[in-house]
Image (cartoon, rainbow, N blue to C red):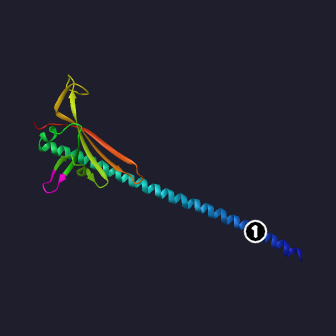
Amino acid sequence: MKTTPKKFNQRQSRESGFNLVEIIVAASILMVSLLSVVVIAGQSITISHRSLNTYIASTLLEEGAEAVRTVRDNAWTNISSLTAGTTYYPKFTTGTNVWSLTTTSSDGTVGVFTRTVVFSAVTRDGSSNIASSGTPDSGTKLVTVTVSWTEANGGSISKTLSFYITDMFS
């Protein structure tokens, strides 16, 4: 009879050891699963934020293009008098509801975004096609609107929209 309790104690001790190993394995699996969920959630938030910023930047690009068209519609001299290669900033004056282009950088700031407009001269070849060299076309300008911002991780991002604008009212 004395041998039975000894075998029972050894079996109970061995089962306790297996139970401890099972608990450690289960806890490890649970920790890895929870950590994976936290990492995926963090990446999802980062991607969502970047996507939102990209969407806002694209609307600011389109608004910048519309601002340039509005300035042109008021008078072609508002465009033709600007210096090629100079950075301009679209500014909307709420008192008069008028768009203008200024060289004051604070006018280009919209939240975390900076919007710029640069004009370039256009030349045409002998067939009146836009070309890299040829006769200057004073009635056409190449417009480049850029929106840039800094992401939370410190990375700088910019989006650009380029188009031609012409003196269509003269």
Helix, strand or loop at label 1? It is helix
* Mark 1 surroundings within 10 Å by alpha-carbon count, few (fewer than 14), some (14 through 19), many (20 or more): few
Q: Is residue 149 above or below residue 126?
A: below
Of residue 103 and residue 152, the one placed in the foreground of this image is: 103
* Position in image of residue 142 (x %, y %): 23, 36
Residue 97 part of the magenta segment: yes
Q: Is residue 123 above or below residue 30?
A: above
Image quadrant for the C terminus?
top left
> Which residue shows up at 20% across the image and 23% down it?
127
* Position in image of residue 99 (x %, y %): 17, 49
Q: Is residue 40 above or below residue 141?
A: below
Is 58 on the left-hand or right-hand side of 138? right
> Which residue shows up at 73% across the image and 65% down it?
18
* Position in image of residue 42 (x %, y %): 47, 57
Residue 67 part of the magenta segment: no
* Position in image of residue 163 (x %, y %): 25, 38
Image quarter of residue 84: top left
Is 98 on the left-hand or right-hand side of 23? left
Is 5 on the left-hand or right-hand side of 87? right
Disc 1 marks a residue whose amino acid type is Glu
Q: In the image as oriented, which residue stretches furthest toward the top?
A: 126
What residue does disc 1 label? 15
Image quadrant for the N terminus?
bottom right
The magenta stretch spans which residues?
92-98
> Which residue shows up at 66% across the image and 62% down it?
25
